[in-house]
Image (tube, rainbow, N blue to C red):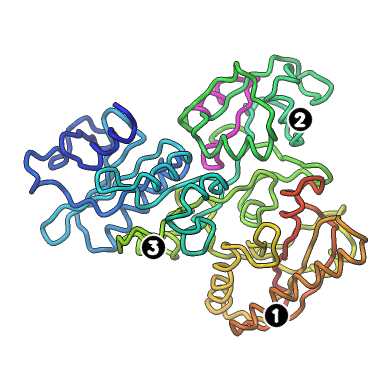
């Protein structure tokens, strides 16, 4: 049976047997004998395993509860653990949300093929929709527009090794060489570890984790064919934990007992994935998790679900599952002897907020996360009774052009953000630019230069 037909059968529920997690018994009502007994299907979410394995079902469960549903449960397919139905009862009637988590590639395919028989109301991805996918859906809206692209959470593709491996830091190039098979022994002088064969563990081709790793690390090179492939993140993590010479890549919540390496890019310091470095997207392999919707689907529950997922309640679930929420918080600014003296002076005793304002690719317009973060910043200041005059914005740029010009552009960028905030009633205390110092990505690539064009946000001491 092909994938779309099988999913249609699932969405229709009839004849599809489920079990509750950890139990072998059939769940009453999920294999009804008459159409009248079938639950009303509110929504179908399809795509990323990273998003759909645990986070999406938990969000769907909380969403139904917020709708005053009772007896809400998450039940998984007996035959395919990547499929789940979240079922509740409201006003005496069963209603359900279906989540199918077979990989990010199925998000655009599902949205494109959406019909009553094969519904996809929301696409889930753990990487941005590709330009080809965007073009395929052009008749259903601009997938990069604010109405269709919704940043749900943040994650980092962690490069993991067994806890017994002495290696703690690798560059993007070293990681690429390991996975391409150029380096095959940990004792190779290029990595300087303890001698032993390198065993590779990777996610499957349909995974957004694989897409992100391929884009940020492999840059077109192929992963060595003998790398062991997994379509389940937990299983990959468990395999590395049992292999002293294993190395794999995984979403941050699945690191488990393994060691997550600090990663450096060309011209950057090595940064370990943690809450702040992923929230600010400074970590080389940080990524965004997305929900995508179309403008041609009139189901009112779509927007309601998206807004719930992005709300404080939804973001608390994001954090509980192990991803990095978009809600703002402050942390003590890093003290690093290698930092620029001017930067150190500006940020002394300051706290850094967990967002950087970034821009649309090749544009001076704020990107979709930044536009949302404007409101989150206003809420953060209000909730914590913080005067906006304590805000410090520091603009950074790429290394294209003379240093003076780059510095001027970075300052203009910071002041542009300050202007947008002022339109929202937030008057920033100070906005400066530091040019191309302290890159967080490789300035020799277009994507790296784009990532380095950012505005960091700080709270100055009272």
Specify which label sits upstream in the sequence, 1 or 3. 3
Camera-nearest residue between 290 and 270: 290
Return the x and y of residue 390 as percentages of the image width and height. Answer: 70, 79
Query: Which label sits on residue 428?
Result: 1
State which quarter of the image contains the C terminus. bottom right
Residue name at image x 73 percent, y 29 percent: 167
Asked if residue 248 lies in the magenta stretch, the reply is yes
The location of residue 342, given as percent across then percent down, is: 88, 66
* Res. 417 mark: none
Q: Which residues are magenta?
A: 235-255
Expressed as whole percent of the image width and height from the top left, the position of residue 182 reads 75, 20
Q: Which residue is mark 3?
A: 308
Q: Which residue is mark 2?
A: 174
How far apart marks 3 and 2 lie (CA) works out to: 41 Å
The N terminus, quarter of image: top left
Q: CA distance from mark 1 to mark 2?
A: 42 Å
Crowding near the residue tagged with mark 3, few <14, some 14–19, many ≥20 C-alpha atoms within 10 Å = some
The answer to whether 297 is drawn above or below residue 350 in the figure is: above
N-terminal of the two: label 3 or label 2?
2
Q: Quadrant of residue 14?
A: top left
- Residue at the front extreme? 139
């Amino acid at each position: 049976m092909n994938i779309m037909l099988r999913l249609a059968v699932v969405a229709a529920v009839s004849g599809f047997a489920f079990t509750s997690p950890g139990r072998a018994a059939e769940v009453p009502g999920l294999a009804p004998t008459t159409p009248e007994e079938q639950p009303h299907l509110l929504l179908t979410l399809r795509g990323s395993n990273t998003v759909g394995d645990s986070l999406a079902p938990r969000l769907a469960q909380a969403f139904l509860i917020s709708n005053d549903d009772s007896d809400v449960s998450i039940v998984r397919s007996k035959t395919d653990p990547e499929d789940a139905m979240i079922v509740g009862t409201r006003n005496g009637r069963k209603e359900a949300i279906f989540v199918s988590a077979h990989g990010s590639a199925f998000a655009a395919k599902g949205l494109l093929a959406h019909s009553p028989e094969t519904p996809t109301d929301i696409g889930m991805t753990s990487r941005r929709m590709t330009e080809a996918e965007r073009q395929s859906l052009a008749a259903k809206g601009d997938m990069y527009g604010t109405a269709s692209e919704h940043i749900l959470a943040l994650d980092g593709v962690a490069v993991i090794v067994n806890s017994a491996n002495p290696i703690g830091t690798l560059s993007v190039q070293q990681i690429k060489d390991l996975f391409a098979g150029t380096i095959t022994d940990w004792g190779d002088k290029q990595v300087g570890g303890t001698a032993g064969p390198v065993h590779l563990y990777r996610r499957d081709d349909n995974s957004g984790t694989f897409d992100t790793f391929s884009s940020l690390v492999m840059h077109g090179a192929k992963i060595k064919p003998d790398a062991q492939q997994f379509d389940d993140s937990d299983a990959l993590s468990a395999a590395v934990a049992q292999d002293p010479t294993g190395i794999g890549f995984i979403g941050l919540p699945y690191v488990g007992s393994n060691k997550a390496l600090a990663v450096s890019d060309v011209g950057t310091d090595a940064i370990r994935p943690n809450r702040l470095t992923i929230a600010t997207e400074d970590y080389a392999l940080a990524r965004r998790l997305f929900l995508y919707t179309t403008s041609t689907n009139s189901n009112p529950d779509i927007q309601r679900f998206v807004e719930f997922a992005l709300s404080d309640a939804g973001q608390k679930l994001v954090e509980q599952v192990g991803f990095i929420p978009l809600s703002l918080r402050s942390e003590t600014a890093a003290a690093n002897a290698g930092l620029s003296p001017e930067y150190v002076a500006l940020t002394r005793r300051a706290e850094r907020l967990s967002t950087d304002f970034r821009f649309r690719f090749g544009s001076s317009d704020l990107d979709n996360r930044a536009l949302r973060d404007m409101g989150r910043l206003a809420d953060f200041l209000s909730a914590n009774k913080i005067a906006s005059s304590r805000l410090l914005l520091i603009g950074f740029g790429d290394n294209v052009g003379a240093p003076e010009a780059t510095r001027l552009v970075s300052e203009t960028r910071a002041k542009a953000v300050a202007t947008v905030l002022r339109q929202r009633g937030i008057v920033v205390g100070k906005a400066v630019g530091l040019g191309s110092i302290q890159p967080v990505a490789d300035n020799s690539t277009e994507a790296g230069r784009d990532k380095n064009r950012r505005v960091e946000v700080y709270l100055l001491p009272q």
